[in-house]
Image: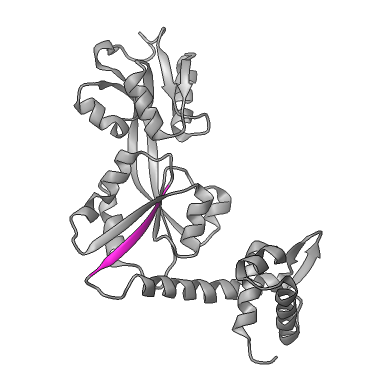
């Protein structure tokens, strides 16, 4: 086999990830025929077939998957190096790029990043995106860290990401202060209206379990996946809400809302996701260590 052409290998790597020649050619600003030719040249030099066609898509062969694994290491390390250099190598200044799931509690996020606010040598950026875009940001080293309240599914766990639970917040029934129900659930809640998180959330599952235990049928006034919207509805609707008290801590301090009672053994969990790297900023290590006390 002739000396490995890393330019050709990079083209193969991009097509292996995307699975579509046309899209990759457009992203790399070359013609599809030129891209195809260089991948064929790589296959010729290696003496193996890397792709086979399945309809309009290219599918990796067994050898192609093995070559991609090496290419992942090579080019992910290269992109990490570019990211490291673009942020500067001066130890006096450090920058963290943090991705945040849009539905996450803003109060939790603020609490999480608060240690960074007192460090004059550290700056940070917060970016809200959908989960797949956040994970892509980690993969290409655009993001250093992702914050989420979603448990990782089996497919995600197989990816080269490091998932760390950084906090859990007890779930509570919250409502107007002047209407507090003092009796244990479900006594006194017969005529209550509810503002609840979406059906596919961890919080809703915990509340549904409590209702099923007591054979209680809630009168659901509204549902919202976004914690910021859930906070506003809890504050302004006069209905009861189920959420972590940290989400409405300001309203509780101001006397607008009150925590009626906590759900037994029910929590919302918060996770920090990072990726395996050659270099981990010290400020990121310290931030994750401090988050254990949130």
Near-viewer residue (1 or 214): 1
Give the magenta range.
93-100
Task: Kindly identify the residue that appears in the image at 76 percent across and 76 percent down.
Answer: 49
**Image location of residue 258, percent across then percent down:** 26, 21
Provide the major secondary structure of the magenta segment: strand
Q: Quadrant of the N terminus?
A: bottom right
Instruction: Decide: is 243 above or below 189.
Output: below
Quarter of the image for residue 19 reads bottom right
Q: Position of residue 243 (x, y in %)?
A: 37, 29
Q: Position of residue 74 (x, y in %)?
A: 53, 77
Can you say whether 88 is above or below 252 in the image? below
Nearest the viewer among 209 and 12 is: 12
Relative depth, front residue between 194 and 102: 102
Instruction: Name the residue at 30% across, 58% down.
Output: 124
> Can residue 264 be seen in this snapshot?
no
- Residue for point 30% across, 75% down: 89
Residue drawn where x is 47% and y is 17% of the image: 220
């Amino acid at each position: 086999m002739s000396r490995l052409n890393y330019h050709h290998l990079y083209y193969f790597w991009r097509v292996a990830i995307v699975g579509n020649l046309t899209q990759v050619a457009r992203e790399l600003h070359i013609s599809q025929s030129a891209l195809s030719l260089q991948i064929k040249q790589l296959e010729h030099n290696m003496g193996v077939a890397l792709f086979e066609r399945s309809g309009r898509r290219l599918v990796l062969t067994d050898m192609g998957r093995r070559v991609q694994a090496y290419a992942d290491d090579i080019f992910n390390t290269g992109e990490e190096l570019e990211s490291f250099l673009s942020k500067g190598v001066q130890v006096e200044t450090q920058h963290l790029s943090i991705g945040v799931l849009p539905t996450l509690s803003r109060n939790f996020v603020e609490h999480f990043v608060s240690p960074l606010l007192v460090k004059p040598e550290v700056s940070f950026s917060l970016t809200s995106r959908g989960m797949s875009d956040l994970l892509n940001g980690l993969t290409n080293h655009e993001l250093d860290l992702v914050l989420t309240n979603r448990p990782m599914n089996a497919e995600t766990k197989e990816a080269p990401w490091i998932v760390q639970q950084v906090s859990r917040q007890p779930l509570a029934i919250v409502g107007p202060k002047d209407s507090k129900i003092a009796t244990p659930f479900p006594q006194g809640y017969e005529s209550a209206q509810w503002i609840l998180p979406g059906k596919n959330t961890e919080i809703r599952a915990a509340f549904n379990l409590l209702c099923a235990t007591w054979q209680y049928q809630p009168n659901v006034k509204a549902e919202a996946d976004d914690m910021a919207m859930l906070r506003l509805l809890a504050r302004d609707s006069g209905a009861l809400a189920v959420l972590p008290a940290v989400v409405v801590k300001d309203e509780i301090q101001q006397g607008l809302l009150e925590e009626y009672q906590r759900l037994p053994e029910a929590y919302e969990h918060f996770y920090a996701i990072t990726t395996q790297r050659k270099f981990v900023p010290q400020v990121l290590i310290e931030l994750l260590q401090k988050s254990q006390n949130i």
